[in-house]
Image: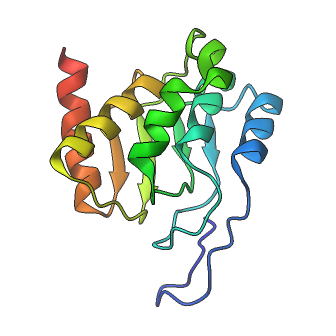
């Protein structure tokens, strides 16, 4: 498994892809069932945002497991932008993958109570079958709890 850092946290993030790169890969590799870009690190320096997740969900409809880096610095704003971006309107009407587990590993996340709701709703909108986000940060546990509540509705 590709890691950005060694066990002592040394090294630097090696994930250099952007949203457009990930979208191109998703469009080219539509039969994927498992996609791993390597375990995410604690740095939030990558160029990908949650905007790359919708193309993955739409183009890789057989996807069951995803491990990806994405920047959470402005995750709430990114979800809000995604819902209003005309480039994504057509994608929003297409079938999505049945992803159940989103592995966010060490991706840091700090959110207010209302922002937790926004992120949980945004993730479920992109991955309607999602059951949880697997991560080391307590906020991801909160997101997973909210996802479970949303899936019961």
Where residue 96 appears, as percent x and y from the top left, is: 55, 18
- Residue 69, by quadrant, is bottom right
Give the residue at x 55% y 90%. 10
Q: How is the image coloured?
A: rainbow
Where residue 56 appears, as percent x and y from the top left, is: 63, 32
Where residue 43 appears, as percent x and y from the top left, is: 50, 73
Where residue 27 appears, as percent x and y from the top left, is: 78, 29
User: Is residue 61 visible in the rendered structure shown here?
Assistant: no
Give the residue at x 45% y 60%. 73
User: Is residue 97 visible in the rendered structure shown here?
Assistant: yes
Depth check: 5 or 52 in front? 52
Query: Left of 93 or right of it: where is 149?
Result: left
Query: Left of 143 or right of it: where is 133?
Result: right
Depth check: 116 or 97 in front? 116
The answer to whether residue 3 is above or below residue 143 is: below
Query: Left of 139 or right of it: where is 12?
Result: right
- Residue 148, by quadrant, is top left
- The C terminus, quarter of image: top left
Query: Left of 55 or right of it: where is 53?
Result: left
Give the residue at x 66% y 26%. 60
Give the residue at x 80% y 37%. 24
Depth check: 98 or 116 in front? 116
């Amino acid at each position: 498994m590709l890691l950005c850092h060694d066990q002592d946290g040394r090294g630097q993030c090696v994930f250099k892809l952007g949203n457009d790169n990930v979208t191109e890969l998703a469009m080219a590799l539509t039969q994927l069932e498992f996609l791993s870009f390597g375990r995410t690190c604690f740095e939030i320096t990558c160029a990908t945002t949650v905007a790359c997740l919708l193309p993955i969900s739409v183009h890789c409809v057989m996807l069951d497991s995803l491990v990806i880096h994405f920047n959470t610095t402005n995750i709430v704003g990114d979800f809000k932008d995604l819902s209003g971006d005309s480039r994504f309107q057509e994608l929003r009407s297409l079938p999505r993958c049945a992803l159940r587990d989103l592995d966010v590993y060490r991706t840091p996340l700090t959110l207010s109570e209302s922002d937790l709701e926004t992120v949980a709703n945004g993730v479920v909108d992109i991955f309607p079958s999602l059951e949880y986000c697997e991560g080391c940060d307590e906020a991801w546990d909160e997101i997973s709890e909210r996802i479970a509540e949303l899936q019961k509705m």
